[in-house]
C-alpha cells in the first residue's frame, strides 16, 4: 500500500507539472501565455522581461522632481492566464500590479500595490488597448473637487522598450494634468534564455545543490531514465540510485567549492552534449581540505521543457 501511495503521488506530480508548463521556468524565466488565455494576454507581450527605466514625478509646487532610476519586470502568472509586474525603485518606493483581462466586460483590470502606501484594499484600474496604446482609468477627484479620472498610458511600445504616462483628466478628457512619466528600455535577451545558456545555468544549479548537499535537487537534475558513470563503478541508473550515489559518505565531508566549466556545448534539437572540466574543494571531518579536478562528458535531453542530464560520465585528473 505504501508503494502504491508513493506511486500515486508521483503520478500526480508529473501530471501537475504538465498542467503548469506556462509558469516561469529555467527555459522561460518570465513564463509563457497560456494557449487558452484571452487573446488580449498578448497586449503586454512586448514588455515581458526586464526594463531599465527612468521615472519622473511632479512635485507639489508643480515642478518636476529629479529622475528616479528603477527596473520594471513583467511576467506571466497563474500558468499564463494573467500578467504580473514589479518595479524596484532607487528611492525604495517599490510597487507592483496584477493584470487580468476579463472577457465578459472586455476590459483589463489592474490591481496595484505599493511599499510606500500599503492598504488592505488594492487600487484598481480598468481599460483596454486602443490602437498602439494601452489605456487604463480609475475614478479620482481633483484637489478642487472636480470629477475625473487618473489615466495611465502605455505608449511607444516596441520590443526595445516603452513609455508610460500618468495623468489626471476631467470626465470628457478636455483637460489633462500629467503627474508621472516613465521611460523604459528593454534589456536584451531577457524573455527567453538560449538553449546553451539554459544548459550553463543548469550546470551552475547543480554546483549550488552540491554545495548545499541537496541530493534531491541533484537527482532531479537528471532525466527519469538517466545513467551516470563515476570512476571505478558499474553504470548507475535511475533517480533513487543516482541520489544514493551522490549522498553516499556525505557525513564525512563538507563541500566548500564546486564549479563546472563547459568547453563546448552542441545543441541538436531536443538533445545536446557538452564536455569540459570540473573542479572543487571539500573539507574533511578532521578539518583538512582537499582539492580536486576532473573531466566530464554529458548528454542532455529536454524533459518537460527543461534541460536535464541523461548520460553523465566523469573521471578525476591527477595532479
Image (cartoon, rainbow, N blue to C red):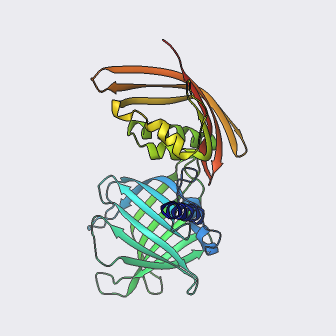
251 vs 148: above or below: above
Measured from the top left, where is residue 162 in percent x and y? Answer: 53, 59
How many marks are shown on the rendered structure? Answer: 0
Question: Residue 285 falls in which quadrant of the image?
Answer: top left
Q: Is residue 77 visible?
A: yes
Measured from the top left, where is residue 109 in percent x and y? Answer: 48, 78
Q: Nearer the viewer, residue 249 or 28?
A: 249
Measured from the top left, where is residue 62 in percent x and y? Answer: 30, 67
Residue displayed at 39% across by 71% down? 112
188 vs 105: above or below: above
Residue lying farthest to the front in this orientation = 1
Q: Nearer the viewer, residue 223 or 88?
A: 223
Question: Residue 80 falls in which quadrant of the image?
Answer: bottom right
Q: Is residue 263 visible?
A: no
Residue lying farthest to the right in this orientation = 268
Measured from the top left, where is residue 97 in percent x and y? Answer: 42, 68
Amino acid at each position: 500500500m505504501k508503494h502504491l501511495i508513493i506511486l500515486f503521488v508521483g503520478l500526480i506530480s508529473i501530471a501537475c507539472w504538465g498542467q503548469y508548463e506556462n509558469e516561469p521556468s529555467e527555459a522561460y524565466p518570465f513564463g509563457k501565455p497560456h494557449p487558452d488565455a484571452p487573446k488580449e494576454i498578448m497586449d503586454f507581450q512586448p514588455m515581458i522581461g526586464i526594463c531599465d527605466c527612468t521615472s519622473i514625478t511632479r512635485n507639489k509646487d508643480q515642478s518636476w522632481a529629479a529622475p528616479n532610476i528603477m527596473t520594471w519586470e513583467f511576467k506571466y502568472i497563474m500558468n499564463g492566464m494573467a500578467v504580473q509586474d514589479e518595479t524596484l525603485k532607487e528611492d525604495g518606493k517599490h510597487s507592483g500590479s496584477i493584470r487580468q483581462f476579463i472577457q465578459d466586460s472586455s476590459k483589463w483590470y489592474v490591481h496595484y500595490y505599493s511599499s510606500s502606501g500599503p492598504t488592505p484594499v488594492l487600487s484598481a484600474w480598468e481599460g483596454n488597448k486602443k490602437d498602439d496604446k494601452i489605456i487604463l482609468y480609475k475614478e479620482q477627484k481633483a484637489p478642487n473637487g472636480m470629477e475625473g479620472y487618473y489615466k495611465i498610458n502605455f505608449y511607444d511600445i516596441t520590443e526595445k522598450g516603452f513609455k508610460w504616462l500618468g495623468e489626471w483628466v476631467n470626465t470628457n478628457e478636455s483637460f489633462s494634468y500629467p503627474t508621472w512619466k516613465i521611460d523604459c528600455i528593454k534589456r536584451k535577451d531577457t524573455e527567453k534564455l538560449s538553449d546553451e545558456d539554459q544548459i550553463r545555468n543548469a550546470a551552475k544549479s547543480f554546483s549550488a545543490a552540491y554545495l548545499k548537499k541537496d541530493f534531491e535537487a541533484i537527482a532531479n537534475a537528471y532525466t527519469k531514465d538517466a545513467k551516470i558513470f563515476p570512476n571505478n563503478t558499474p553504470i548507475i541508473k535511475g533517480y533513487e540510485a543516482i541520489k544514493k550515489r551522490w549522498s553516499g559518505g556525505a557525513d564525512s565531508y563538507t563541500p566548500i567549492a564546486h564549479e563546472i566549466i563547459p568547453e563546448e556545448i552542441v545543441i541538436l534539437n531536443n538533445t545536446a552534449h557538452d564536455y569540459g572540466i570540473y573542479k572543487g574543494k571539500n573539507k574533511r571531518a578532521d578539518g583538512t581540505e582537499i582539492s580536486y579536478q576532473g573531466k566530464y562528458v554529458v548528454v542532455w535531453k529536454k524533459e518537460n521543457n527543461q534541460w536535464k542530464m541523461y548520460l553523465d560520465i566523469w573521471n578525476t585528473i591527477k595532479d
